[in-house]
Image (cartoon, rainbow, N blue to C red):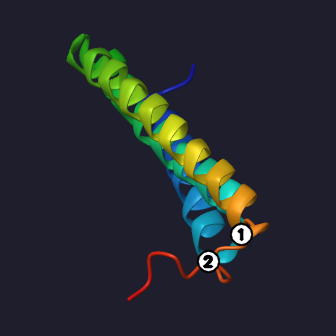
Amino acid sequence: MITLTHYLVASALLFAIGLVGILTRRNVLMILLSIELIFNAANLAFVAYARAWGDVGGQVVVFFIITVAAAEVTVGLAIAVLLSRQLKTLNADEISLLKW
């Protein structure tokens, strides 16, 4: 039987993989993908707790997180397309557009 601990370990692994991806990758698309992994780790934890406690509140929170993640992907991909067209690169180290 799969217990709450199994879900939380899987969630922690997803979060760790996403965090490592953010810290090590320099491609904007890979950074966006890593952020999505972190969102999905939070979703998994919320659903696991909701299932363990028999409450639908966690599932409602997951619905809103998915909505925010969809908006984040839309804005992020629009920015990535804009950067790709204007600067001809998606390398985060070479993008100084928003730096002081």
The residue carrying mark 1 is: 87
Residue at the spot 58% in from the left edge and 48% down from the top edge: 14
Is mark 2 in CB contact (under 8 Å) with mark 1?
Answer: yes
Residue 9, numbered label: none
Which circle's residue, 2 or 1, is located before the other in the chain?
A: 1
**79 lies above or below 48:** below
Q: Which residue is drawn at 38% across and 24% down?
A: 67
The residue that disc 2 covers is: 95
List x then y, in percent, for residue 48.
40, 26
- Residue 15 at what x, y percent from top left? 52, 53
**Of residues 11 and 52, the one drawn nearer to the viewer in this rendering:** 11
The reply to whether residue 89 is in sight is yes
Tag 1: amino acid = Leu
Is 26 above or below relative to 12?
below
Q: Answer left or right for 18 relative to 71.
A: right
Quarter of the figure with the N terminus: top right
Residue at the location (53% across, 52% down)? 35
Residue ID at (65%, 60%): 83
For the residues labelled 2 and 1, the Cα–Cα distance comes to 8 Å
Q: Is residue 49 above or below residue 87?
A: above
Query: In the depicted view, which residue is nearer to us: 78 or 54?
Result: 78
Q: What residue type is labelled 2?
A: Ile
Q: In which quarter of the image is the C terminus?
A: bottom left
Q: Element at badge 1?
A: helix
Q: In this view, does 77 lie to the left or right of 5?
A: right
Q: Which of 92 and 63 is in front in this view?
A: 92
Q: Position of residue 76 (x, y in %)?
A: 54, 47
